[in-house]
Amino acid sequence: MDRTVQPITKDIQDFELALPQRTTLTNGIPLTVIDSGEQEVVKLDILFAGGRWRQLHKLQSIFTNRMLKEGTQSYTASQIAEKLDYYGAWLELSSSVSHEFITLYSLNKYFEPTLELLESIIKEPIFPQNEIDIVVNANIQQYLVNCSKVDFQCRRKILNVLYGDHHPCGVNVIEDDYRNLTRNEMESFYHEYYNSSNCTIFISGKVTDNILKSIDKHFGSSSFGISKQASPLNNYPIFVSPEKRFLIYQEDASQCSVKLGCHTINRTHSDYLKYRVMVKLFGGYFGSRLMTNIREDKGYTYGISASTMLFPHDGSLVINAETDSKYVNLLIDEVYEEIDKLHNSLVSEEELLKVKNYLIGDMCRGYESPFSLSDAWIFIYTSQLGDDYFSKAMEAVQNITATDIQAMAVKYLCKDNLKEVIAGNFK
């Protein structure tokens, strides 16, 4: 090999992810199998429709899911932790706006005993009050630490400004909400959503017949829970604050957090895949317009980004940066200047090619391991997208033009719609 000669590069023409194997357990639970990889390890994802969109009390969804591993009819919290450690397994419990996720990483040779433990965690949690108190107090301490951070305050405020006090995205949690959440509320949420009729399972990695038999044995042999499917997600009314700028003063802050936000489209919109490229070029990666101007040229910040937060019925475009108080107005002016440039001038072919290559490379890297493939198909499922989403996304990147970028910017980047939230020592 002559290392003085650059390897030949070529464009990616076709981008198709092999469809996973879809089947059902004996009791009807949908099972998606991504059999890929050579390592003797698997990732099991068990999903229940629920999420904070459906909760009746603040923090109810996340704490119910979090408390599953803190004690069952068969095991104490310490026994669960010890067994997971002994088997070299890792358990993650997380919640989104619409789902609860229970994710288990396990060595194949210990999958059966580990799954037996997981079955107890899911089917027979007891929500012990002493463990609830420990977890709640730990979270209160973390909440109080977060409240001292300008970025945390700014993020809460921008969502409240865009959605209002009674929308799941706009509701802010306070310290008393942690203290007021009860064991009965967790049990109620658990009985409402944790059942076999409301469950979907994904298994990825080196999936063997024994792995599949174990899953069916522990989760497919019979129905569990109170059989009931989750209701559709409500379309809550949105109340946008009429003011343009909102200040959160913190005298001892060394930096100001600046967030500009407005409502935008989500993944189900026909423009989304082109819009996504425009946002990436504007502020979505290190070579973006915002980074090049405001960080590299002006030096107002160490980092600035633009991204879309996606929710069931809409999305929000948020521009985020931290800067010294003396640069706040200058930074915001430059953001608006970059919006004007995208409105009034076509991007160059060189710049467009750079963002295309970045996105294509990012997509390829994101789907190269069995676990990342599983995450991709879980994303398709929870977002209610079609199996052709990935190929359509690649096609949109490959075919987008400078004129398309300009059209997306004119349509979805509007200075008048952007709300400004500044937290820090700025008046």
Image (tube, helix red, strand yellow):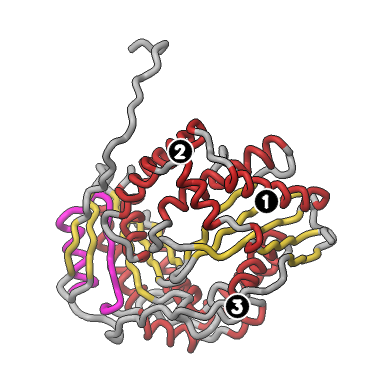
Tag of residue 358: 2
Could you tell which of marks 3 and 2 lies nearer the N-terminus? 3
Q: Which residues are magenta?
A: 196-220
Q: Quadrant of the N terminus?
A: top left
Quarter where residue 271 is shown: bottom left
Left or right of 70: which side holds 322? right
Task: Find residue 368 and report its image quarter.
Answer: top left
Query: Is 325 drawn above or below residue 77 in the view shown?
Result: above
Q: Which residue is mark 3?
A: 239
Amino acid type, label 1: Tyr
Q: CA distance from mark 3 to mark 1?
A: 24 Å
Q: Residue at x 58, y 82 (%)?
A: 166
Above or below, 273 relative to 176: above
Magenta span: predominant SS is helix
Please tell me whether mark 3 or mark 1 is closer to you in this view: 1
The image shows residue 208 at horizontal and vertical percentages of: 18, 53
Residues at discs 3 and 1 in contact (Cβ within 8 Å): no
